Image (tube, rainbow, N blue to C red):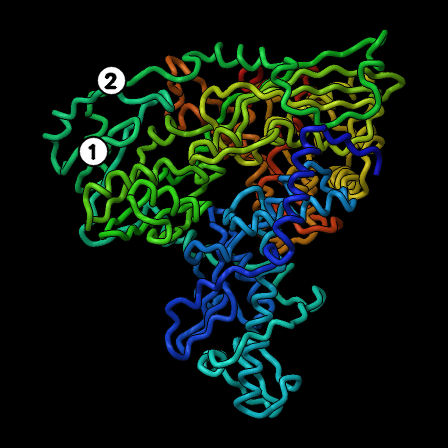
Amino acid sequence: MGRLRTIGRRTFLIGSTAVLGGVAFGTFMAARPHANPLTAGLAEGEAAFNPFVKLTSDGITLIVPHADIGQGVQSSQAALIAEELDIEVEQATLSFGEPSPAYYNTAFAEEGVPFMSFDDSTVAETMRDVAGGVLKLIAIQGTGGSTSMPDQYEKLRMAGAVARETIKAAASARTGVPVDQLKTANAAVELPDGSTIAYTDLAADAAKIAPVTKVTLRDPADWKKVGKPMMRTDTYAKSTGTQDFGIDIAMEGMVHASVRVNPRKGGPMNSFDATAAEAMRGVKSIVPVKNGVAAVADNTWRAIEAVNAIDVDWAPAPYPAEMDGHWEEVAASFTAERLDQEWRAEGDVDAAFDGAEVIAVENRAPYVAHQPLEPLNATVLVEGDCVTVWSGHQMPRFVQQQVAGIAGVEADQVTFINQFSGGSFGHRLEFEHIKQATEVAVTMPGTPVKLTYSREEDFVQDFPRQIAMSRARGVVADGQIKALSLDIACPSVMSSQMGRIGQSVPGPDMQIVAGAWNMPYDIPDLRVRGYRVPELGPISSWRSVGASHAGFFAENTLDEMIRAAGADPMEERLRLVNHPVHRKVLETVAEMSNWGEDMGPNRGRGLALVESFGVPAAEVIDVTMTDGGIKIDRVYVAADVGRVIDPVNFENQVQGGVIWALGHAINSEITYTDGMAEQTNYHAAEGMRIYQTPEVIVRGLENAEKIRGIGEPPVPPAAPALASAIFDLTGERLREMPFNKFVDFV
């Protein structure tokens, strides 16, 4: 496995405290189940076997609590339950459910402890268990970090199995046939004589008995759904334009609102004059909100037009007004005082540099917007001491808390009804739009208020991906990398994001170096350090979070060192890679792409391997030089998630992630002038055009021991693989995104 990193003292102390805390709160507290939210309000003859399956005489309801933000997780969750319950997904009603501690997500623990993903030592596993126990106790319910499948893989199958066996027990009690002589299929119990009893006909019987919890999950060899190509539950609706999203909410008596908040994010509003807006057709009221103002009208368009007509005096930005100031602060952060953590320390880097010819490299990654197609929106209804919220969001219980604080009620008096989201990429981890909708709704009790951001406001108020910079030094000799020191500086994503909802994040921020500190390479002298830049513009999680910049820095630097050594990018990585799962990923992408073939004139090829969220993903990118510029021809991707739940959706997620990453790498950034984002719509942050889109060839591997998610891991390798390919083609090393600053693309 090669040498593992040395755990820094600060991280070790925090981890030790967590372990001791785990002993203190006890195994019982961590193991104790949360109450089943489905039992509340059950009618006579209705059964709720666990928090995920409800059975009535009218039908079967499956609770799939992870938010569907376009990644198809509703289907995957439902399939896991259906596999064990012996039903077709189409035979059930699917619901995101109401927020509940029962839907805690312990998979966040894997990314929250400072150990290599493949470190299965006693200390590492104990830390993961303790962290998971803490997450269960505080009942963090959330979608993100590619955790949906790791979190639900066993829970949902167990839920389906418990429901199935309980229904069989009910059938046995009714018919007198022993349970071991009963079978299930197609939402029915089959008796030995060939007759069947529909699950729905057994609801009342099942409601009278305790759930059967001693069940055995089926061998994957016997699966009929999971692991096989599936039709996503949202395919038809999204293909026909009939899928409802949060922005489609409509109800009787509803009014519409839109907002303008200080474009210098975090700065207050000094004053406003709404005289012109108040005289506009359809306008009902003007409502101040935190750091801004909202207009309420009889439709969304009129609300947007009205709020844009308000004359506002905005206060200055609480961060540097111009981009030079941002970069200067980042560059000034490579100091001992701002050292956040030394994450990897193997060999003696300083000794290796002494007297050697050292290669020095600097890379940069800009602020980048989330820019999903569906702009932020929320509908809020205040009725007495009860509040109902309709919106698409990834952290339902935090929504309740934030709304409760504004409305002056308890969190359990807030009903949150999660909606399908038209994209997120981390955008719907934020709460400002829901808080603003609530601010307006409390002024109009009894009236549903639907707040919708204009596209421009969605861009301007976005909390983008972090700005970041790396400085690296390396030594190569005899065609090999001998030593590497990689320093990365950026503001803390976690502190910025969680600080907006009043949560503190103690200790070092692993996202500063995610995708870099855990590079799976056995370099003799290796050091990776993270430096925390004081907070600049407010930032947020962006698809793949820290690995989106640190993975680029690590692989782009490594590739530059390999080529400086005169080595083959694939062969040197294979020599260095220190884990068999990662090695197999590299070998697979080499075989897929026929690495080593003669590319011919005017063509280039690049490679990158980045692990994020426990998933090693390797990408080979082929490019061609044309008269108009560089064309990206083809991308080969191999990734190992331990178990592929749906091969079709897996392929789609990888393809989408690659296109997302390449589009931003070549075309997109957010820059500030006078404290305000200059990019206010898609014309200034294009992403990837259809004519630029390459063929993306995908292979999912299943060698890893743990189940992982695929939503984010395809993103980090794309930019460094493209930079590698461009160097191979042109001899020019691109060290800063977006790449269209330096080369043309067609």
Location of the C terminus by quadrant is top right
| Residue under numbered circle 1 | 287
Is the residue marked by circle 1 packed among few (<14), some (14-19), or many (20+) residues within 10 Å?
some
Question: Residue 645's image quarter?
Answer: bottom right
Residue drawn where x is 59% and y is 89% of the image: 194
**Of the numbered discs in the image, which one, if any, rests on residue 672?**
none
**Of the numbered discs in the image, which one, if any, rests on residue 313?**
2
**Cα distance, mark 1 to mark 2?**
16 Å
Whether residue 628 can be seen here: no
Question: Residue 6's image quarter?
Answer: top right
| First in sequence: mark 1 vs mark 2 | 1
Question: Would residue 206 appear left or right of 439 to someone viewing this image?
Answer: right
Residue drawn where x is 55% and y is 19% of the image: 533
Instruction: Classify mark 2: helix, strand or loop.
Output: strand
Question: Would residue 564 appear left or right of 516 to someone viewing this image?
Answer: right
Q: Tell me if residue 239 comes above or below residue 329 in the rendering.
A: below
Whether residue 305 can be seen here: yes
Location of the N terminus by quadrant is top right
Residue found farthest to the left: 279
Q: Tell me if residue 268 comes above or below residue 622 in the rendering.
A: above
Q: Position of residue 719 (x, y in %)?
A: 62, 28
Query: Label 1 sits on what residue type?
Result: Val
Q: Position of residue 550 (x, y in %)?
A: 63, 27
Is the residue marked by circle 2 packed among few (<14), some (14-19), or many (20+) residues within 10 Å?
some
Query: Label 2 sits on what residue type?
Result: Asp
